[in-house]
Image: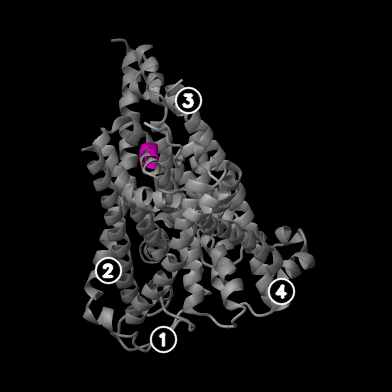
Amino acid sequence: MNARLRWRKFVSAFMLSMTGICALVAVSALFFILGYLVFHGGASVSWNFFTRLPAPVGETGGGMANAIVGSAKLLFLATLIGVPVGFFGAIYLAEFSGTATAFVVRYAADLLNGVPSIVIGIFAYTLAVLPFKHFSTFAGGFALGLMMIPITLRSTEEFLRSVPVSLREGAMALGASKWKTIATVIVPSAYRGILTTVLLAFARVAGETAPLLFTALGNRFWSPGWRQPTASLPVAIYNYAISPYEDWHRQAWAAGLVLLGLILIVNIVARGILARGIAVSRS
Amino acid sequence: MATTSTTVPSAGPLAGSRSLLSRLRDGDEIARLITFLFAASVVLITVMLVYELWQGSALARHRFGLSFLRNSVWDPVFDQFGALPFIYGTVVTSAVALLIAVPLGIGAAIFLAELAPLRLSDTLEFFIDLLAAVPSVIYGLLGIFIIVPLMRQVVQPQLKRFLGFLLLFRGPAFGLGFLTAGVVLAIMIIPYIISVSREILLSVPRDQREAALALGSTRWESTWKVVVPFARTGIIGSIFLALARALGETMAVTMVIGNTPIISSSLLSPGDSIASVIASQFKEATGELYTQSLILLGLVLFLLTFILNGLARVMIVVTSQRGSGMAHP
């Protein structure tokens, strides 16, 4: 083996192991993040954290019950806005529309998907805060809902399109009308994919902070109804992290751990549903 | 047997031949109309978004015109609003992020697509997807409490000691600043580069690799000189996509950049970016011109990401079609 060949083989082995190290570094970032959150926040996740209101500045203790409920309300509203629009829009794209209309809708959805979340915040502010002259849960949920639409729309459409043509033809050959075919054959056979899509979109907006900064604002107390500013976990993490108080930093870590735990669990469940579906259809 | 002439409801491509009346009776036209309204609302929302940004910044656009982009003074007290420090901060932090994330991301993508067995590759990709799901405020949290102290105490003093002769690493080590924001951004965009590049590399036809190996190239040479150039356009697309993310990234940057509208050649200096100035000042903005200038910044950011996303999508589609086109001629 001459020296040149040996050198080439060495370069090959060296560079390939470097790519392995790159992959290792990238993946280990996830475990670093999780590790730090558990290390700093684990001790502060207590019963009080889930059930108490924030303590006044200077006092230790207190929790983030209002932020947790606030986040739940915001996400409920977001799902109520984002999922129907995305789902029915996707049905139109996959089943009814002509190519030109579909192109326009898809283009709009992709554009909306690429809009930075802070700009979505400005948009929601001009639409849902300015006319009513006050920050509200409704405005925050609206902003998050806007972000869910393009994510739900595009991947629901993909899943609807992947339903085999033979199923449609079978249903229609039996005399079913088009909408009956969609409602009883196509959507049920794509339901795993659609459910995964909705869960992933939910997880994606659950951690969004920027659109809430000047729509839902924040609140140190309970926020009854839908027309008042509300606390939310992501905004609480931000406000607590940039505050000068040691005790608030501890709470920020705890809130971060709870939020990330929720998001990762929803992600894993969503992917599990999809993977099971693929395994079933293969067997 | 008598031939009956019952009309059979037609399926598929023939569906259009049914009369409007029968389709209306079956509910098809109603379903079509309802779903159309939802689809149309997506277009409406997007159009309104652009309109609101344009309309909402009218005053600032008329007052400053294009000089808004060139003016480097941001002084709300005297109604002086120039976007240059923020554009500078956005560009510099994104550049630092790409400098770190591109080699790492593409290296990892090569490993996942070319070397790792499918099962390992899928498992690692699963973790990468989870990493992409971590919200930006969590990165900000880790940035403030882990990366900023690390930068202030270890990395920045060392950079000053060994590379201090460069203009890039001068001034006091605050910890907060362009460099730290760039590093945090890099960690955030690596998953996007990996996921998209991996898909692109996997779509490169097998015979390309086999041909290179048959000609006597090593594994690395076949990867680096054949597979990667084949996928080049798509990989650049994935980088554009990641860049668009980095430009629009708000929370993590706001928390570690220092929030000071300064243009400085030193990466250690605190600064500010477009997204982060909107996040930190919009709520407190008093006065029409102040708010409108911030909305105008939002419009600038929107246009930047719009152009980058468009380019990225075209590049990715072109590459994956080239790959699949050659695999199935």
At x 57%, y 44%, the residue is A98
Callout 3, which amino acid? Gly
Subunit that carries the residue with mark 3 = B
The residue singled out by tag 1 in the image is: A224
Subunit that carries the residue with mark 1 = A
Residue A89 position within the rendered picture, expressed as x and y whole percent measured from the top left: 50, 55
Callout 2, which amino acid? His
Which one is in front in this view, the residue at disc 4 or the one at disc 3?
3
Front-most of residues B272 and B246: B246
Q: Main secondary structure of the magenta part?
A: helix
User: Looking at the image, is mark 4 or mark 3 earlier in the sequence?
Assistant: 4
Image: A57 above or below A107: below
Q: Which mark is residue A40?
A: 2
Q: CA distance from mark 1 to mark 2?
A: 32 Å
> SS class of the residue under badge 2?
helix
Q: Mark 2 vs mark 3: same chain?
A: no
Asked if the residue under mark 4 is in contact with the one under mark 1, i.e. CB atoms within 8 Å, the reply is: no
Q: Which mark is residue B289?
A: 4
The residue singled out by tag 3 in the image is: B325
Q: Residues within 10 Å of mark 4 (few under 14, many from 20)?
A: many
Region of the chain picked out in magenta, as a range = A164-169
> SS class of the residue under badge 1?
loop
Which one is in front in this view, the residue at disc 2 or the one at disc 3?
3
Q: Mark 4 vs mark 3: same chain?
A: yes
Left/right placement of residue B324 relative to residue A121 reads left
Callout 4, which amino acid? Leu
Which one is in front in this view, the residue at disc 2 or the one at disc 4?
4
> SS class of the residue under badge 3?
helix
Q: CA distance from mark 3 to mark 1?
A: 58 Å
